[in-house]
Amino acid sequence: MIKALEQANAGSDVILNLLKQHQGQWLSGQFLAERLAMTRSAIWKKIEILRKEGYKINSSPRKGYLLADIPDRMLIREIRDGLNTSIFGQRDIHCLEKTDSTNRRAKELAAFGAAEGVLVIAEEQVQGRGRLNRTWFAPAGENICISLIIRPPLLPDTASRMSILAAVAAAETLIAAAGLKATIKWPNDILVGSKKIGGILLEMSMEMDAVDYMIIGLGINVNTPADHFPAEFRSKATSVITETGKPFPRVFLLRRFLELLESWYRVFRESGFDPIIIRWKDLTDMLGRQVTIETINGSCSGKVTDLDCDGFLILRNDREGEMRMFSGDITIM
Amino acid sequence: MIKALEQANAGSDVILNLLKQHQGQWLSGQFLAERLAMTRSAIWKKIEILRKEGYKINSSPRKGYLLADIPDRMLIREIRDGLNTSIFGQRDIHCLEKTDSTNRRAKELAAFGAAEGVLVIAEEQVQGRGRLNRTWFAPAGENICISLIIRPPLLPDTASRMSILAAVAAAETLIAAAGLKATIKWPNDILVGSKKIGGILLEMSMEMDAVDYMIIGLGINVNTPADHFPAEFRSKATSVITETGKPFPRVFLLRRFLELLESWYRVFRESGFDPIIIRWKDLTDMLGRQVTIETINGSCSGKVTDLDCDGFLILRNDREGEMRMFSGDITIM
């Protein structure tokens, strides 16, 4: 039964690839039937499978089939089509229509041994969270809500390196793929102008001597128009469609993020954290700013002078000298 | 059904308390039946329940019942009998005959929301682990294998504070309860002389801004005689019975540990980490030693000069100056 289903999907994949290669052209049922060594009615069944997944395929008794539109859905085959990574997104991908939180699902998978590179994606996240359990607004089908499992060789005290690295990849994705002037607001927000367009939620499980797993949660507002945000977010949030004026294919952004993240992660594994610090400094405008940072241990104020080799933000004021900040809520003065 | 079972146990508890209050004395069936407003045959059934749990209760048709011995088993009622804590051990206690790893069980409970103070105990741990997945030898019924859930308000970079705090409580337990000259070998071993008698395995789940939960795993070799250790451990491991020459009630050690741990944890919450550092320095002989520390990021050597306010060991050598060590494998020169 499972075997049969795989064959059916495999057939659909071949047909889809042929249609994509000839996008804008009609392919006759006869041509497809010959290429796949199937009857024309078997071809028609596979076309129906693709239509159910959201592909718009026109058909005509005389001309055959034409791929009119690719759906903006998080389909595994679309994510992998042209994905230039070797690990991230190349292991299991769990695509969910709806979940409470992709980070929570990914943590469950990781706790049962899921490998580095396993990905959880949701079209809709009903209890999506930002840091400290804050609500993350994520309506169905419009945004990127993903969680990736990684297992880096890190001690717990340098965990913030991965948060910095993921923020670099997220900001670069918006710059490279969507042409936006994205910047990083420490520790985990991605801004366009002064408005938040995305964020990273890093969670981890560890012993004292090593990280067991980390979950890189990424949220990006893609196709939610400005006036669809709830009133309380409207002045603080933006989206790709708001900034560029047109809908953007989410899969394209996701592929780019996975590629950039894997590429920076490889740099980190091979050359250490310094190259990431340098790139982070290009992408942030935190340096030199007067800020107040609140943590669960209290708050402190000062001027941002640096990001150190462990991923801590360095703050300085006259009274307390230099302070190393692991994470926290930052307010720019 | 559950209600009936609770009543049965409640009755057994009352009988056991009466027998304990009159230990060494016979209590007549008539006396017990009147005190509990039960028939003498109902009393007999409850005595049988206690016997199944391991209590040695002598009976005589004329004299009644006499508590001859309390089993050295990790029974919830024995743990709580005289336990002077308000949280640790006062929430759910999960007593298991056999488990792969108490830390693993505790992590599962914590992931589903189990509160601070919930305790997992195993008579036998078949995949017991030390740090970095090393084997921890723990034969059935002879040792302490527990895991406690805590939810401290900590940032991930200061997680080692809890490892230091737990080691202080463990060393003090062996000193106060068993009269041993226990010392702390950084980061998580408890020694008597140069031999290991116990250890702490701290695991945790966290976001960047806060710890979600930590699991304090404690293992103490209690009643395993020296010649019962596997050959490869014999020169490096010891136990309470080896050091004192007599079997020791494990429940007594466990109660003491929970009390000391809760007391130090309260000190930490109310007065910060400094008092724990001071006590740790009393209990270790690491200071001033030449050591090599191996971590997943490499190794470094130097003289131990201090333990800092975040729980890092401070190492100094001429070439690299001062180094802050979060955790690692230490070798004393």
Image: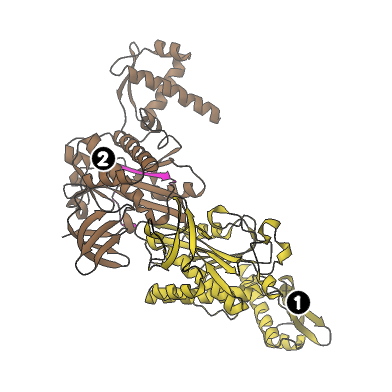
Chain colours: A yellow, B brown
- Residue projecting furthest to the front: A318
* Number of residue marks: 2
The residue positioned 40% from the left and 37% from the top of the image is B88
Residue A276, position as x, y percentages in the image: 44, 74
Instruction: Name the secondary structure under disc 1.
Output: strand
Q: Chain of mark 1?
A: A
Q: Which residue is mark 1?
A: A56
Q: Quadrant of residue A100?
A: bottom right
Q: B210 or B95: nearer the eye?
A: B210
User: On the rendered structure, is B286 left or right of A301?
Assistant: left
Q: Which residue is mark 2?
A: B172
Lateral position of residue A48 relative to residue B173, left or right: right
Q: Residue at x 67, y 87 (%)?
A: A21
- Left or right: B95 as drawn, with respect to B138: right
The residue range painted magenta reads B133-152
Three-letter amino acid code at the position of disc 1: Lys
Residue A11 is a magenta residue:
no
